[in-house]
Amino acid sequence: MAIAEATAGRQRRRRSRGRRTPYLLISPAVLLMVAFLVYPMGSVLYYSLQNYNVTKPWDNGFAGLGNFRQMFHDHLFWSSLGFSGKWVAANIVLQFLLGLGLALLVNETFIGRAFARALVFSPWAVSGVLTTSIWVLLYNPTTGITRYFADMGIGQHGSSLLADPHSVFGAAVLTEVWRGVPFFAILILADLQSIPKDLYEAASVDGATRMSRFWHITLPHLKDAIILSTLLRAVWEFNNVDLLYTLTGGGPANQTTTLPLYVAQKATIAHEFGYGSALTMAAFCILLFCSILYLRLSKFGSRDS
Amino acid sequence: MTPHPPPPARLKEAVPVEEAAATPPAHQPRTRRRPDRGPRRWEIYGPLALYLLFTLIPFYWMLLYAFRPSTAKGLMPWPLTLQHLDDVWNGQGFGTYFLNSVKVGVTSMLFTTVVAVLGGYALARYEFRGKRVFMVSLLCTQFIPGAMMLIPLFEIFKHLSLVNSLWSVIIAESVFQLPLALILISGFVRNVPVTLEEAAWVDGCTRLRGFLVTVLPLLRPGLIAVGSFAFIGAWNHFLFALMFLSEQDKYTVPVGLSYQIGDSGGVDVGALAAGGVVAAVPVIFVFALIQRYIVKGLSAGAVKG
């Protein structure tokens, strides 16, 4: 489109060269992605139809749908899938609500705003493993903050929230929420700032309350950003292994094993590459299906609501 | 909210923030008459203070244990000691891990940004066959679970003799960061009016020079945002480094941390906290510097991209 608007003489020269230029420009990205994303994805598909276990090479060979049949009878597959769903839902709902509130809050004008923003957004930069380090300290029964609460009569002495099957889910979610809220807050704040100010002024003149301005101006404007950010985050939370791998290791008693964590364990500890690949394919398809469904149901991209 | 009853102590802090922050306009009736100019001061500082507590207490806990002698008991890091930091930096090899992480982070950042600028410019400024397919596949890559690429990527790097080399991690990180970086940068380029470039061409600039003179300076906030995403992502990522690097002098900081968590069990809390400080300082520092560019950069049209 840029080419069409250029001056006549240059236009011809540019057009002949212009045909190759975009391909040259994207070629490094394409090459990298083909070599290290597409090809591996293809080999996952291939391995998923194979028996492939480094520790049992005599069994290796074509397995057909055997891995998938094994999956259907694998209790841990279903329970990890169920936990993945629960994990994603709890995290997204909490992170989104807190993130939206936080974004609205730091979008107001007040003294010390820049500093407050930097502080409340800071966990965004922290890794899953570091988050674990910090919260392991906090949950530790002797050194943690839980002991100080227990001293005050809240909770019990000598128990780690991560070891107790009743509290481990809440404790893990709280940890991930701590890290995840800034992601939503940053994205939503960015989108809030692109709302034209005069919309609000016009609404104020018409006597609209703060509540109705939020419902009729802010939310519709944020809609696409909300859909996209919740979807992206949900996918990342689903795929995220770092935190649970280090925080709970999937325990106690596999209670916090997500599907990708199960795959990672199959790959790194059990070396069942064939079965792990079948699990991978299943996770990828489920994720893709849910995402398309979500985009359809939420009518992504249609502004009038 | 959460199916299991979450830890009582922590929830006490989290819930009021959510209610207060997610529905700020809860105090309507009195102001319905006249259009209000904005929330009152306590309506901002109250929820903000609560949320800051939730954000900062975990950081404080880490600093407390990192800089307090193991024998001390108080809630202030006093008397101050650098003993733990010295232990992990020199004794446990975090000095080496830190250097490795810097190498991985900086190289991935440069690599990702350069490749993404080339491709992003092509996506924004040219029409070419296969562009739509390419864009859609960029989005699809977001569904690929990193944990599930462990096996095939490991095999590839084994063939390339890159196992146990930092390059394996650098390549894997860059490739995983690339799709999002491409999408973001093409959005940023699209926001630069094409007429600016055309003016440069009329003045006799080549396409490349026109880009360098007009577009690149305006891309700065976007480039800073994308570059810092890549740096922080590569600095934080854990699973690839864990899988591909098996010699201790190649470990990155998150891998070092994970082994600390693994065998801590409450044994050496000071070292765990000090390791956390080593992992946190660079990302928090980078984040503090670029935080406002992220919001500005994203608000400039990334979500719409």
Image (tube, coloured by chain):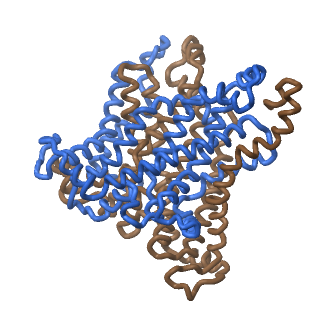
Chain colours: A brown, B blue
Image location of residue A68, percent across then percent down: 61, 75
Determine the image quadrant of residue B146: bottom right
- Disc count in the image? 0
Residue B17 seen = yes
Image location of residue B88, percent across then percent down: 26, 54
Give the residue at x 20% y 53%: A143
Residue closest to the eye, A138 or B152: B152
In which quadrant of the rendered image does the C terminus of chain B lie?
Answer: top right
| Above or below, comparing residue B125 to residue A205 in the picture | below
Direction from residue A66 to residue B224 in the image, left or right = left
Give the residue at x 38% y 35%: A120
Residue closest to the eye, A114 or A203: A114
| Above or below, comparing residue A173 to residue A245 in the picture | above
Image location of residue B87, percent across then percent down: 22, 54
Name the residue furthest bottom.
Answer: A58
Give the residue at x 44% y 22%: A108
Residue A86 seen = no
| Above or below, comparing residue B277 to residue B29 in the picture | below
Determine the image quadrant of residue B26: top left
Image location of residue B253, percent across then percent down: 37, 54
Direction from residue A200 to residue A34 in the image, left or right = right
Direction from residue B215 to residue A258 in the image, left or right = left
Determine the image quadrant of residue B27: top left
Give the residue at x 40% y 65%: A250
| Above or below, comparing residue A114 to residue B235 in the picture | above
